[in-house]
Image (cartoon, grey):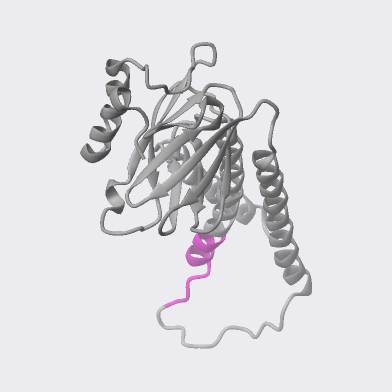
Amino acid sequence: MRRGSIVALLGLALIAGAVATAVAVVPTWLPIEASREAGRIHFVIWFVIVICIVIFAVVAAVMIYAVARFRVQEDDFEDGPPIHGHTGLEITWTVIPFVLVTAIAIVSAIVLSRNDAQAQDTLRVDVVAQQFEFTFSYPDAKNVTSPVLRLPKDRSVELYMRSLDVIHSLFVPQFSQKEDIVPGMVTQLHITPTRLGTFPLECTELCGLGHSLMRSQAIVRPRATWSLPTTGMLFSDWQAMTQALHPTQRLRSMAMPHCGPCE
């Protein structure tokens, strides 16, 4: 291949790679990382995106160069020269995808293993899902219940989830983890919050007519000042926590400071 062709291919690859990189980086595709596990998951996502950008740049450069350089003349109706094959090329385009897919699998397996590893001093939260609400209970606080998930920052949390009716799924976008909640099973989800704030919590499994209303919140507070929900909680604090809930859930949560946990 002549030097001019190599330079043209490299230039086209750089342009295609720059465009793909801008599309990947400039828009905000991913939510803010609010947990240690989310950071690892986002690393895997960007690892795969970088591989995809490189592949796209190479393929786009070759395609554009081939179309521009080897375009057939309008009055040329002859067949091209017969090509039997190229063993080296076939081996190359088999080995490279194999290596890339293997690398993605290894990185993903390491991240999933670390995300599922249970740490010491883990806070247990029992989650009950039913049409169309979540209920969170805290065994360390005599199983007091809450319509919102209250978590301490930088402490490992293990959710033990079960369903009373159909399949549900718990998802907090900022935690980047989603777990199905299946009737007759207890599923688990490990979270280590790293960012203070209030984050949306929703069911992502179609569970009936009221599926879109099955929403709650995950509230992360500093570990030093974090406390489990109790019946003695200030009404104003409880009202602030539940202001984004569906009206039926809001009424239920607002009654809890006065009447105790509702079942």
Q: With respect to residue 84, does 119 lie above or below? A: above
Q: Residue at x 52, y 22 (%)?
A: 152
- Residue 176 placed where, x, y %? 50, 40
The magenta segment: 62-73
- Residue 41 placed where, x, y %? 58, 41
Q: Is residue 242 visible?
A: no
Magenta stretch contains residue 3: no
Q: Furthest-top residue in view?
A: 224
- Residue 144 placed where, x, y %? 45, 29
Please state if 236 lies on the left or on the right of 76 as rendered: left
- The residue nearer to you, when weighing 212 against 6, is 212
Q: Furthest-left residue in view?
A: 247
- Residue 195 placed where, x, y %? 49, 23
- Report the quarter where the C terminus lies: top left
Please state if 226 lies on the left or on the right of 58 as rendered: left
Quarter-of-image position of residue 81: bottom right
